[in-house]
Image (cartoon, rainbow, N blue to C red):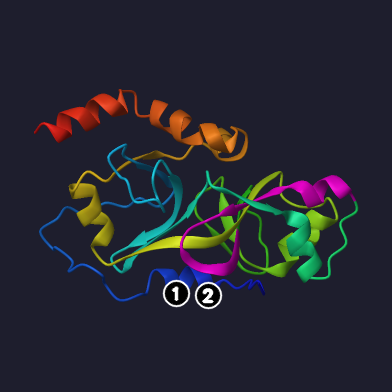
Amino acid sequence: MLLKWSISAICDAIRQPSILAYNKKMSRINLTGQFLIAMPTLLDPEFQQTVTYMCAHTNEGAMGIVINRPMNMGLGEIFAQMNLNPIDPEIEQIRVFHGGPVQQDRGIIIHEPPSKWDSTINVSDRLGVATSRDILEAISKGQGPERSLIALGYASWGAGQMEQELAENAWLCVPADENILFEVPPEKRWEKATELLGFDLYQISRDIGHA
């Protein structure tokens, strides 16, 4: 698989045609910089028990990166394709994540702090999203950002689609927590993200199911 690194991956994600008609009566929300947490009732295998870091949310749509689906791939495989030679073999073992079902040959890096790489978007004052070769070169030299998550692919929603799915109780959202994003083991990120909500997510799901 030939990997691509371009900021257009993010720009294109929020310009795709609408999948659901936008309901102008629906209150406007902005999930940029939030965790999107799949409800227990969401059984779509692509998103079941996922936590997605939302990179952009506008009237045109939304784009995010799933942060708890590690792939059977280390960063060394990406370095090999890009002819990069890491100074430390341990860097090659860094996990790469399945960021979502869209353009799975696109590489995207969530990083802290939001430094100025060649192609980057500052999602918040603490986190950025980069898609350029220079950040990978820096990581291979041990000069990368303090913390990062490397993903292939992303998730995207057309205009109004996210709002509709929220109204259907498919998701809940909470401000992103950097420690969950970077430090908590991937298999525990959904559980830890739900704890940020401050209530029993399974109880809420049962109540919705009996509504």
Residue 34 quadrant: top left
In the displayed structure, 13 sits above or below 197; it is below
Q: Residue at x 80, y 52 (%)?
A: 92
**Do callouts 1 and 2 mark residues in contact (Cβ within 8 Å)?**
yes
Q: Residue at x 77, y 70 (%)?
A: 81
Task: For the N terminus, give its image quadrant.
Answer: bottom right
| Disc ID at residue 8 | 2
The amino acid beneath tag 1 is Asp
Q: Residues within 10 Å of mark 2 (few under 14, many from 20)?
A: few
Across and down, in percent, residue 9 comes to 52, 71
Across and down, in percent, residue 160 comes to 23, 63
In-image side of 84 versus 122 (left or right): right
Q: Is residue 92 magenta?
A: yes
In-image side of 140 versus 210 (left or right): right
Which sits in the foreground, 170 or 135? 170
| Magenta range | 88-108
Across and down, in percent, residue 118 comes to 67, 69
Give the structural element (helix, strand or loop) at label 1. helix
Task: For the C terminus, give its image quadrant.
Answer: top left
In the displayed structure, 141 sits above or below 187; it is below
Q: Is residue 22 magenta?
A: no
Report which residue position mark 1 lands on. 12
- Residue located farthest toward the right when viewing the structure as drawn: 87
The amino acid beneath tag 2 is Ser
